[in-house]
């Protein structure tokens, strides 16, 4: 029976008249379809005389013409060398050992060069080198089309001869006038350059050299100088740590130059039932805090007094201090430090000389073996006091000439306008730089320097260890090295290469061969004992601390992002698109604030319809200094009463407009203090974030398996029932492991190689070097902020970050919560969550769900365990991505090379030089994903075949495994039973991600173990 | 140190004395053999000497006329001794050639030297096989092909009579005047001329007044000697090709006939089944053709672009037997086989500035020399003074790539050449017979896969395969393992 029941589409319809309903009824499309965008000018279109018939004729003609034209293949030329260099074999990569030193990052590296083009950075493991995300990405900065290509004087391009003439004549004038000449540089740590500056001083007399680190560690350097007599930083051997207590020091990040994670990771993997204990007192959630066993939230002002209290507790002294809310935790930490004896260490990340003195004193008292005061580090030598003096002198007109090298003070100085003003009073200002940045553009002379991959040089990263920098490509532009210019200006005929070689032969080599050292890239010598301990009166320090740390308001804590560092590589699209390990947000910096404070101030983060994250904005004020419209990101684990803000963003000169992201936090970096008292005020407007992870928690699932050290060591329990539980299903009325039940025919992987990848969640710090390494190795495109917001980022390897929640099954039971309430609350991370990182790439399932659904068999399985993606076969149905339980497949929504929309490195001839010629650049409409670096495994096999030998363990590497400095990612052949990975796969900590679905991945994870022992 | 020197001098003295004795014994040697001489010249002298041009040493053409034979023998066997002995001529040469002493050749017997001299002094050109080149023959053949071949063959009647051994039938003067203007001869009433005119349907032979006496003599010489075996074979191949063409046409004709019949059936019959079947056949046939046409798009076997230098693989790899990997040296190390850089060319062409081999396809020596000159132009080599020009801007040679694999297919030469021990010609064909290289294989995926399916992996001598071979042999129950069974058909291995 028919019914005349009426279904209301919405409540609006119940109203007698609603304009909205009327509109919906009449117009199929409520908003006008923006056809103009693709059809061009609407007016012209209406007036056009082209009829439909004509249109069809044109279409027919062009189709025929296009297909006829396409029948003829293009003529491709093959142009060999005229005289081929002996060491170059086209198609075979050469590796050169060199050193990166840009004033912020220092690393011994190997550079992979193909047909004369550097295309990939690898750590020089022989030299103990490791790479972070920025070092890995630095090769792309070489091919930056926004580099300064010609020397400029007063905004006009001139040639180098004129530069020399003008500058030398001015220098001679200044010399006769007795005016001062100043070199303002970043940390050089280069023995030969320093000796060159000394020579310059001999020639021109009144010369001063000031070193300036944009992100200052001056407090630590000053303290060490006062206590040990040498202007340097102590070295730390974290592989000896049993207990480490950190006060705001992100020692797994960039603290004091970084590079400690490899040693520390050795103590984090439980061995014989033991692992180190890591206690972190901090305000911002840092990489170190995220990886710590115990994280205590504390404002910087509290951290300061807690550190004194710790000193008092340990030594029994009674320095003046204050009670803090975290004293109970300090007491526990003191106990653990004491029980660890010489294997205990305390580190402090606040840039304050007094606090650093107390830290040194604590370590001295502990007789910590972790701290090495002999082999000192030279990676940070900036002197804040001298910089402040210099600016004052410049302002007073006392400085005749200012040569700036590896520094960008107009961008990085707290009150940039003052520095600019001071710079104008300098007679001759010369900026040596790679691009026409903020300082170069306002200096008299902007002189282009080569990238470090085009340069000669030397670095002494540590006392007693020396590394060489050598060019791996001919200079791309009309550049001159800083050192070559100095040599010419002092009237020397020598090139810097000659000078360097002579300097090394007479001062450093002594018995060692130049060519061998150049080949190795480094030379380790017996370090000279330079330091001598001098007791320092700490009571005055404590009094000064009491004065300096009496904040009442909000405390702003500056930090640097793993991706951006101090901001000198801001024009690097890989780094811009690199998601921050903690916030998982790219293309931005922002204020991080705790949930509690955000609620108080009415600040919000919310997701819009496509899932993308939006947030409120605030104004920050320190005295008269104001930073407007800063986006707000609500950060679980941010200490209440504090906010965090990353330095290194907000560059505005000498770069692509797309890359001018974020806001310049240096403008609030008063007196180079790592924290400031600040007032916050909500402002109008909504900011759009490019955040790649919208979910914070695991919602009670076993995505990351985790246990505590005591449970792990309890031999009475069976891991497969407890902390490494395998899912059980019923088969033939018996409970069996889910992975043993299968509908599939297994692949036979017993013959030949069978590749597996093991990821240790204990060793992984989330640093992201692997993400950039994968980007570089596999020609992964950069898609830009808008596309990242659309969840169309292309990273083959992502590092998921999960927060713990206060809600779990047990709590829900005791509170008698319903399922819905439970899950709602599970979504909310704790105020101080435990954090875990999990790198996820294609899991290379032996029973791969993607393979079965591909209608064209474009994704297939190899005998070596790799799930292979054949781009030229793919028709882009995206079934595979839908069916992938790990969501690791990436679709090329657009063409990212040679296009009008995405103007990143793949879109210009220079940027394309970084592409790996062994990997296809994918076109629009095809799926792509991690290949387990099949081009690398195949190459290793081929090398072995050509040499008639078996492949040794360790020879098989993926880009991520070779970039991983903490050895968290291990790759190899499990059919080689002696290999490291074969053992790891059998380890009791090993588990497969989502094992219940029976995909049998070739990637295994190692259960994360936390050392929660409080005594 | 000093004693060693003395010892050497003594030794040298003894040897020279001994050689001198032999020399006196064999002084009345026979005539030299230029063929053997050429071999010896190439083995011992050619590194530093050419016949016509100055290289490291002076040109040696007709050197026997300039110098006394005895002097030459002494000089060749130990020039240094001759210089030391104060011989004026010897010192003069030493000075002229930048005081670079010539190597001593005590291993050459007097007869050897005489052979060499008979080679350097001969006027005859020698072919690659060492036999004298019959220049008249080559020239005659060329003239014949350009002027006569349209109407005459050596053995068969074409438009005109066969010309093999024509000189047996006719006198040379008659032939000359007939070739230059046959019409005039016929008009003049020459009997023979009129007879031929009548015999060949009164078709007039074109007059060739432009040919010189010498050229006509050469042509007649060529007709007398006849074609060598090689070109006869070539002719036979041509005939085969003709046959092939005929067959093709026959097939086409049959197809056209069938189509016509089918169309007639469709139009005339009222039997629906027959009509339907006929239409179906036509549709199927058309689809078949459409697909076969589509499948050949982008398949370029036979692609033979014109290169900037008429580089002949036949001359280099065929005649002179240069190993492929001498020039394409990276094939064994790398994914690419590398077009040789100009410095590789110059390794040999420093001393080979002119072409003396067999002339192919009607090209003359000047043409080949011109092509060699193109290398010198690129690299800035001064042929006359045998050195590189100073401040010369070198420019690479822009070759046209013959084998173009799609960008999405990864191919590695080393994998095939070194690990797989595959011969170059398996994929590149008989390059040593190609004047200009053309693409031999279709380079389609089907072609790759076919080979991977059938090719056995040679595992015996390679330690890499030891374990794998044992396991595979056990699994497959056979000792032979093909590339496909090793995983050589997996997509990702070539598409990544």
Image (cartoon, rainbow, N blue to C red):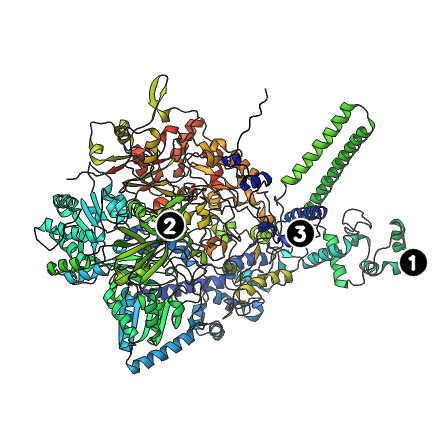
Q: Quadrant of the N terminus of chain B?
A: bottom left
Residue occupied by mark 1: B189
**Mark 2 near mark 3, Cβ–Cβ under 8 Å?**
no
Describe the element under mark 1 as helix, strand or loop. loop
Kindly identify the residue that appears in the image at 37 percent across and 25 percent down: A740
Kindly identify the residue that appears in the image at 16 percent across and 53 percent down: A305
Can you tell which of label 1 and label 3 is closer to the viewer? Answer: 3
Outermost residue, front side:
A16
Q: Chain of mark 2?
A: A
Q: CA distance from mark 2 to mark 1?
A: 116 Å
Between B215 and A77, the one nearer to me in the picture:
A77
Kindly identify the residue that appears in the image at 58 percent across and 69 percent down: B65
Describe the element under mark 2 as helix, strand or loop. strand
| Residue A488 appears in the picture as rendered | no
Write down the quadrant of residue A221 in the picture: bottom left
Residue occupied by mark 2: A616
Q: Chain of mark 3?
A: A
Q: CA distance from mark 2 to mark 3?
A: 43 Å
Between B435 and B166, the one nearer to me in the picture:
B435
Position of residue A536 measured from the top left corner of the image (x, y, whole percent): 11, 60
Write down the quadrant of residue A997 in the picture: top left
């Amino acid at each position: 029976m028919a019914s005349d029941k009426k279904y209301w589409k919405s409540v609006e319809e119940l109203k007698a008249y609603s304009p909205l309903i009327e509109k919906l009824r009449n117009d199929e499309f409520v908003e006008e379809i923006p056809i103009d965008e693709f059809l061009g000018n609407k007016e012209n279109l209406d007036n056009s005389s082209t009829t439909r018939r004509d249109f069809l004729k044109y279409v027919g003609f062009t189709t025929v013409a296009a297909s006829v034209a396409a029948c003829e293949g293009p003529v491709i030329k093959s142009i060999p060398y005229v005289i081929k260099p002996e060491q170059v074999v086209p198609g075979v990569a050469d590796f050169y050992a060199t050193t990166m030193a840009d004033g912020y990052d220092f690393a011994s590296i190997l550079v992979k060069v193909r047909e004369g083009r550097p295309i990939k950075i690898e750590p020089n493991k022989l030299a103990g080198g490791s790479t972070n995300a920025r070092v890995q990405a630095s090769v792309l900065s070489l091919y930056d089309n926004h580099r300064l290509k010609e020397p400029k004087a007063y905004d006009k391009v001139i040639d180098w001869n004129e530069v020399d003439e003008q500058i030398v004549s001015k220098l001679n004038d200044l010399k006769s006038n007795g005016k001062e000449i100043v070199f303002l540089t970043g940390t050089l740590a280069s023995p030969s350059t320093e000796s060159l500056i000394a020579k310059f001083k001999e020639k021109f007399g009144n010369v001063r050299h000031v070193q300036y680190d944009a992100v200052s560690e001056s407090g630590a350097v000053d303290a060490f100088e006062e206590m040990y007599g040498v202007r340097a930083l102590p070295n730390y051997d974290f592989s000896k740590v049993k207990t480490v207590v950190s006060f705001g020091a992100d020692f797994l990040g960039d603290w004091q130059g970084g590079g400690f994670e490899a040693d520390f990771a050795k103590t984090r993997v439980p061995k014989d039932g033991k692992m180190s204990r890591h206690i972190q007192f901090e305000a911002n959630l840092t990489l170190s805090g995220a990886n710590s066993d115990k994280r205590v939230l504390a404002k910087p002002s509290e951290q300061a007094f807690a550190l004194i209290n710790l000193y008092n507790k340990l030594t029994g002294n009674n320095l003046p201090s204050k009670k803090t809310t975290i004293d109970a935790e300090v007491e526990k930490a003191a106990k653990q430090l004491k029980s660890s004896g010489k294997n205990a260490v305390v580190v402090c990340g606040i840039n304050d000389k007094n606090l650093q003195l107390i830290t040194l004193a604590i370590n001295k008292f502990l007789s910590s073996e972790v701290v090495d005061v002999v082999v000192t580090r030279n990676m940070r030598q900036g002197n804040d006091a001298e910089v402040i003096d210099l600016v004052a002198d410049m302002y007073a007109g006392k400085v005749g000439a200012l040569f700036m090298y590896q520094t960008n003070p107009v961008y990085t100085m707290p009150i940039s306008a003052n520095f600019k003003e001071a710079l104008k009073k300098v007679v001759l200002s010369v900026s040596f730089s790679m691009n026409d940045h903020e300082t170069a553009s306002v200096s008299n002379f902007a002189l282009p320097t080569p990238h470090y991959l085009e340069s000669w040089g030397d670095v002494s990263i540590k006392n007693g260890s020396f590394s060489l920098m050598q060019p791996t490509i001919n200079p791309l532009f009309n550049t001159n090295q800083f050192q070559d210019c100095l040599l010419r200006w002092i009237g020397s005929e020598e090139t810097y290469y000659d000078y360097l070689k002579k300097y090394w032969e007479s001062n450093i080599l002594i018995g060692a061969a130049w060519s061998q050292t150049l080949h190795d890239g480094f030379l380790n010598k017996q370090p000279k004992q330079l330091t001598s301990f001098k007791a320092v009166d700490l009571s005055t320090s404590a009094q000064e601390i009491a004065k300096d740390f009496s904040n009442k308001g909000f405390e702003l804590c500056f930090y640097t992002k793993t991706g951006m560092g101090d901001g000198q590589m801001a024009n690097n699209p890989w780094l811009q698109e690199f998601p921050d390990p903690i916030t998982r947000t790219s293309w931005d910096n922002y204020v991080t604030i705790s949930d509690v404070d955000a609620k108080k101030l009415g600040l919000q983060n919310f997701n819009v319809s496509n899932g993308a994250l939006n947030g409120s904005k605030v104004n920050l004020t320190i005295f008269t200094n104001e930073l407007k419209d800063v986006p707000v990101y609500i950060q679980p684990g941010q200490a209440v009463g504090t906010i965090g803000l990353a330095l290194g963003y907000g560059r505005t000169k000498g770069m692509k407009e797309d890359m001018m992201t974020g806001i310049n936090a240096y403008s609030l970096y008063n007196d180079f203090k790592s924290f400031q008292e600040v007032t916050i005020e909500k402002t109008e407007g909504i900011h759009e974030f490019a955040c790649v992870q919208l979910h914070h928690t695991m919602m009670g699932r076993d995505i990351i398996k985790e246990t505590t050290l005591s449970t792990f060591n309890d031999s009475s329990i069976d891991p497969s029932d407890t902390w490494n539980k395998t899912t059980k299903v019923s088969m033939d009325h018996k409970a069996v492991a889910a992975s043993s039940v299968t509908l599939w025919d297994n692949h036979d992987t017993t013959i030949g190689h069978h590749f597996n990848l093991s990821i240790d969640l204990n060793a992984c710090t989330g640093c992201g070097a692997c993400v950039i390494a994968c980007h570089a190795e596999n020609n992964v495109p950069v898609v830009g902020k808008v596309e990242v917001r659309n969840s169309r980022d292309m990273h083959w390897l992502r590092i998921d970050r999960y927060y713990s929640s206060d809600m779990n099954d047990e709590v829900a039971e005791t509170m008698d919560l319903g399922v819905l309430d439970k899950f709602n609350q599970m979504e909310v991370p704790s105020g101080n969550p435990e954090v875990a990182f999990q790198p996820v790439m294609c899991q290379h399932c032996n029973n791969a769900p993607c393979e079965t659904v591909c209608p064209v068999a474009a994704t297939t399985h190899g005998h070596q365990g790799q799930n292979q993606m054949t781009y030229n076969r793919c028709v882009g149905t995206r079934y595979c991505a839908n069916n992938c339980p790990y969501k690791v497949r990436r679709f090329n929504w657009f063409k990212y090379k040679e296009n009008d929309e995405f103007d990143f490195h793949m879109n210009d001839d220079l940027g394309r030089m970084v592409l790996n010629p062994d990997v296809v650049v994918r076109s629009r409409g095809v799926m792509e994903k991690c290949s387990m670096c099949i081009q690398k495994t195949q190459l290793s096999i081929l090398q072995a075949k050509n040499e008639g030998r078996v492949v040794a363990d360790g020879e098989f590497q993926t880009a991520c495994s070779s970039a991983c400095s903490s050895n968290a990612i291990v790759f190899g052949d499990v059919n080689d039973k002696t290999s490291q990975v074969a053992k790891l796969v059998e380890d009791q900590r090993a588990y497969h991600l989502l094992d219940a679905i029976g995909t049998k991945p070739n990637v295994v994870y190692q259960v994360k173990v936390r050392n929660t022992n409080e005594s | 140190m000093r004693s060693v020197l003395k010892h050497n001098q003594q030794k040298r003295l003894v040897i020279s004395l001994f050689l001198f004795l032999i020399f006196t014994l064999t002084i009345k040697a026979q005539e030299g053999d230029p063929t053997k001489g050429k071999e010896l010249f190439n083995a011992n002298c050619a590194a530093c000497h050419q016949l016509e041009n100055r290289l490291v040493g002076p040109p040696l053409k007709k050197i026997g006329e300039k110098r006394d034979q005895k002097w030459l023998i002494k000089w060749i066997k130990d020039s240094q001794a001759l210089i030391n002995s104060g011989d004026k001529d010897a010192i003069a040469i030493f000075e002229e050639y930048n005081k670079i002493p010539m190597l001593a050749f005590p291993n050459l017997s007097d007869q050897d030297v005489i052979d060499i001299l008979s080679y350097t002094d001969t006027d005859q050109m020698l072919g690659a096989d060492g036999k004298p080149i019959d220049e008249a023959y080559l020239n005659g053949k060329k003239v014949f092909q350009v002027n006569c071949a349209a109407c005459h063959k050596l053995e068969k009647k074409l438009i005109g009579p066969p010309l093999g051994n024509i000189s047996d039938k006719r006198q040379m003067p008659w032939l000359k005047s007939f070739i230059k203007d046959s019409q005039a001869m016929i008009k003049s009433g020459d009997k023979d001329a009129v007879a031929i005119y009548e015999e060949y349907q009164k078709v007039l032979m074109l007059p060739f007044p432009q040919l010189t006496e010498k050229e006509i003599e050469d042509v007649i010489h060529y007709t007398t000697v006849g074609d060598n075996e090689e070109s006869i074979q070539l002719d036979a191949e041509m005939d085969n090709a003709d046959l092939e063409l005929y067959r093709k046409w026959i097939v086409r004709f049959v197809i056209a006939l069938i189509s016509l019949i089918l169309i007639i059936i469709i139009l005339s019959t009222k039997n629906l089944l027959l009509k339907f079947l006929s239409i179906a056949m036509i549709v199927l046939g058309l689809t078949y053709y459409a697909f076969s046409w589509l499948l050949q798009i982008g398949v370029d076997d036979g692609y033979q672009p014109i290169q900037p230098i008429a580089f002949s693989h036949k001359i280099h790899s065929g005649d002179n037997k240069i190993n492929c990997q001498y020039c394409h040296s990276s094939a064994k190390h790398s994914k690419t086989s590398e077009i040789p850089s100009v410095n590789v060319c110059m390794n040999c062409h420093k001393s080979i500035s002119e072409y003396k081999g067999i002339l192919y396809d009607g090209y003359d020596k000047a043409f080949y020399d011109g092509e060699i000159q193109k290398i010198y132009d690129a690299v800035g080599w001064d042929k006359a003074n045998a050195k590189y020009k100073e401040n010369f801007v070198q420019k690479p040679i822009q070759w046209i790539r013959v084998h173009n694999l799609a960008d999405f297919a990864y191919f590695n030469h080393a994998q095939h050449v070194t690990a797989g021990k595959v011969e170059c010609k398996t994929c590149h064909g008989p390059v040593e017979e190609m004047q200009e290289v053309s693409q031999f294989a279709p380079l389609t995926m089907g072609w790759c896969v076919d080979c991977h399916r059938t090719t056995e992996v040679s595992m015996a001598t390679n330690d890499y395969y030891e374990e794998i071979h044992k396991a595979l042999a056990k699994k497959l129950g056979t000792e032979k393992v093909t590339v496909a069974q090793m995983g050589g058909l997996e997509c990702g291995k070539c598409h990544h």
